[in-house]
Amino acid sequence: MLAMGVYVLDSRNNYSKSPSSKYIESVNLCILNTHSPDSSHDKLKYHARLHLIFKFCMIKYMYKYMSLIYGGELFMRLRQVADILGADILCGRDKLDLEIYYAFSSDLMSDVLSYANKKTLLLTGLINPQVVRTAEMIDMPAIVFVRNKKPGDIIMKLAHENNFVILSTSHSLYTASGLLYASGLKGIQIDS
């Protein structure tokens, strides 16, 4: 079953054209040629090995999804954020290729002012004009509203005027943050 999962991932994403295709093909062969374990100890080792192989394939897929820049620092495009979160694009559809380097999740705008920077994506459950005004002060390019919250007309007008990308996802703040972190988007480093 795992071999089929890797094979589908391989064929659907055209890994044959990527530099990692040789490894993916060898993973397929390795999984397909692995014999069925007899003892329970062998089964544990067998499943641990399959888990590691599958994990490596998922990391390769994640790096295909992410982009590298000169300093080796990862960034994510807003289009990818919307895909990962299954978010609705409420504003700024033409700016989805903007690069995001960090994410910051908060309902306290004072924390956002203290820690976030202009390459940061703001995730919040707070729906009021102060969110957009705070993001405007920092030059943040995008805001994600969580828990299926939809901003009102005043917020949308401010967002249009300031060229923001506004997304809305059904995920909770915790889950949305976790999905982005698991996909490689870093959080803001807070020094104590």
Image (cartoon, rainbow, N blue to C red):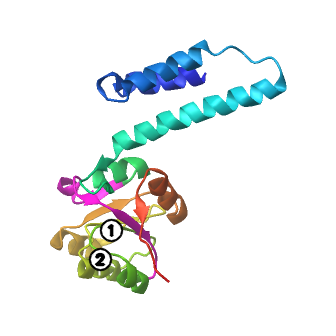
Dot 1: few (<14), some (14–19), or many (≥20) neighbours within 10 Å? many
Secondary structure beneath dot 1 equals strand
Decide which of 58, 130 is in the foreground and name it. 58
Which residue type does callout 2 highlight?
Ala
Q: Picture coordinates of residue 23 (x, y %)?
A: 43, 25
Q: Quadrant of the N terminus?
A: top right
Q: Picture coordinates of residue 66 (x, y %)?
A: 34, 47
Q: Nearer the viewer, mark 2 or mark 1?
A: 1
94 in the magenta segment: yes
The residue lying at 51 percent from left, 36 percent from top is 56
Residue topped by disc 1: 120
Magenta residues (range): 88-108
Residue 135 is tagged as: 2
Give the CA separation, mark 2 to mark 1: 9 Å
Decide which of 175, 11 is in the foreground and name it. 11
Q: Picture coordinates of residue 175 (x, y %)?
A: 53, 58
For residue 151, above or below residue 23: below
The residue lying at 23 percent from left, 71 percent from top is 159
Q: Is residue 100 found left or right of 3 in the rendered image?
A: left
Q: Picture coordinates of residue 126 (x, y %)?
A: 43, 75
